[in-house]
Image: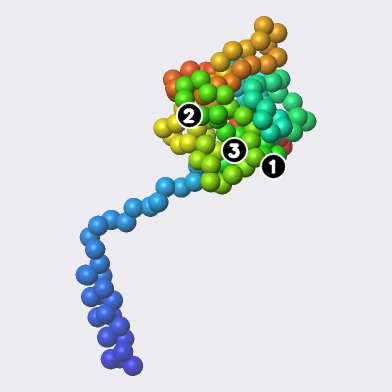
């Protein structure tokens, strides 16, 4: 019994000495999650609003009962409105953002959200509230280069 313990300790010591000196690097985690309203940093009474497939995403007066404002960002970066997904028409400056059928093969349906909502990843263009109507009840949303201005900031607000 004693010999087995000593042998096991020697094997463990050899394995520790033979282990690579390179530190192990953790894999990046999933994007931050969100569920509920995305409130405009520029117009705090307006929220990102989807709709049926094909609808251009815009901002509208925040309404917890509006199912098209209940957005969900999955751990894989897919931004959903109900059973549908949000995607830009392209990654070009000024591109419109629409509600589309979800497609796991479509890289344009991937988003990153912290304070800004970025297309693709942390290097993508930002969802930008371009204009707001004179009555302040709706706004135009486009994909633009990130500047950090209030019209590109979004606040997550839970529905609960």
Q: Residue furthest right?
A: 65
Mark positioned earlier in the residue sequence (2 or 3): 3
Q: Which labelled disc corresponds to residue 54? A: none
Q: Residue drawn 48% across and 18% down?
A: 149
Q: Quadrant of the C terminus?
A: top right
Secondary element at tag 1:
loop
Q: Residue drawn 28% across and 76% down?
A: 12
Q: Are marks 2 and 3 in contact (CB under 8 Å)?
A: no
Q: Residue drawn 64% across and 25% down?
A: 56
Judged by depth in the image, the label closer to the viewer, 1 or 2, is 2
Q: CA distance from mark 3 to mark 1?
A: 10 Å
Q: Position of residue 159 (x, y in %)?
A: 71, 35
Residue under label 2, please give it: 91
Q: Which labelled disc corresponds to residue 83? A: 1
Q: Position of residue 24 (x, y in %)?
A: 32, 56
- Local crowd at mark 3 within 10 Å, few (<14), some, or many (≥20)? many
Closer to the camera, 20 or 145? 145
Residue under label 3, please give it: 79
In this rendering, would 102 be left or right of 128? Answer: right
Closer to the camera, 15 or 29? 29
Q: Is residue 95 above or below residue 1?
A: above
Q: CA distance from mark 1 to mark 2?
A: 23 Å
């Amino acid at each position: 019994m004693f010999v087995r313990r000593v042998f096991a300790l020697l094997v463990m010591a050899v394995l520790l000495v033979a282990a690579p000196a390179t530190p192990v690097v953790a894999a990046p985690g999933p994007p931050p999650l969100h569920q509920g309203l995305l409130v405009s940093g520029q117009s705090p009474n307006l929220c990102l609003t989807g709709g049926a497939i094909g609808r251009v995403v815009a901002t509208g007066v925040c309404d917890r009962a509006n199912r098209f404002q209940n957005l969900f960002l999955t751990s894989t970066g897919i931004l959903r409105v109900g059973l549908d997904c949000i995607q830009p028409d392209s990654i070009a400056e000024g591109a419109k953002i629409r509600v589309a059928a979800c497609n796991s093969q479509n890289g344009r349906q991937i988003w990153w959200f912290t304070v800004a909502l970025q297309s693709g990843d942390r290097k993508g263009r930002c969802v930008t509230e371009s204009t707001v109507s004179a009555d302040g009840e709706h706004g135009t949303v486009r994909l633009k280069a990130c500047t950090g201005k209030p019209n590109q900031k979004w606040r997550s607000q839970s529905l609960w």
